[in-house]
Amino acid sequence: MSPAARLAVADPRDRLIVALDLPSLRAAEDVVSKLGDTVSFYKIGYELGFAGGLGFARELIGEGKKVFIDFKLHDIGNTVARGVASVAGMGASFLTVHAYPQTMRAAMEGKGASPLRILAVTVLTSYDEADLAEAGYAAGVDETVRRRVEQARETGIDGIVCAPTDAAMVRGVLGPKRAIVTPGVRPAGSAAGDQKRIATPAAAIRAGADHLVVGRPIIASPDPAAAARAVQAEIAAALAAA
Ligand SMILES: O=c1ccn([C@@H]2O[C@H](COP(=O)(O)O)[C@@H](O)[C@H]2O)c(=O)[nH]1
């Protein structure tokens, strides 16, 4: 299967998801206001989520934006299923869980008939071989990602979060109908920070990613809207060439 096989996305802006990793509602409102209509999809994780960000997520949804809740759930099945049901009730579009079979099954049960899509996180993009070994895993990154995607596929999961460097392999295992979402995306010349398995927006798209998550290269830019437009232009060019 060609790695370029990917889901149709009605609004091309939805290919870019901006991570609102910011310490306060005021900071998030400022970035969202600077991004305006350029960005249609936002990700809310621990930092903003624990600083009032869930109410802000509801506001964004009310204004017609899409929201990805990135809390990477992992708990006993009952707790995961009930937590997922609450997120489904918010009207969020994406929610992450860790790619453990029991957790993924519980999440898929918890979302019920809602349009919320459950994404399974395989191996964090800040991990390399040494980090996995330090955490006690005998298998390396490729083998661990592959195994988790196989298990995720068996649970009927809606999509996968993986590094852009894993996306072609993941697409081959997952098939064309489920979403691949890649953080660890860095426009040429931008700092990697703590990310270890990274690629440019064009390379991520060529590898088969459907949605790209970009945080610091946009939210820390002096002109976030220009930075977002540059990523969107790179995505569009890569899609046109695929
Ligand atoms: O494997 C993963 C899973 C999630 N993330 C999240 O994506 C963004 C990336 O932000 P950058 O500033 O562009 O590095 C961040 O919110 C992470 O929590 C990830 O990076 N890797």
Image (cartoon, helix red, strand yellow):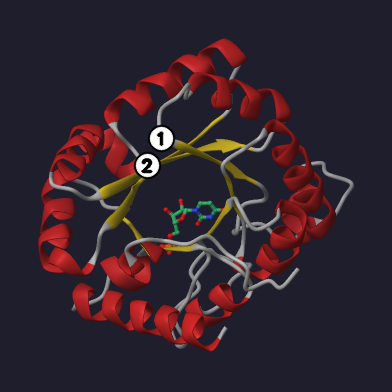
- Mark 2 touching mark 1, by CB under 8 A? yes
Which SS class for mark 1? loop
The picture places residue 133, in percent across and down from the top left corner, at 81, 50
- Mark 2 and mark 1: Cα distance apart in space: 7 Å
Using the image, determine if residue 124 lies above or below residue 172.
Answer: above
Of circles 2 and 1, the one toward us is 1
Which SS class for mark 2? loop
User: Label 1 belongs to which residue?
Assistant: 115
Residue drawn at 36 percent across, 20 percent down = 86
User: Label 2 belongs to which residue?
Assistant: 93
Judge left or right: residue 43 versus residue 108: left
Residue nearest the observer in this picture, 185 or 64: 64
Quarter placement of the N terminus: bottom right
Can residue 214 be seen? no
Total numbered labels placed on residues in the image: 2
Judge left or right: residue 167 versus residue 239: right
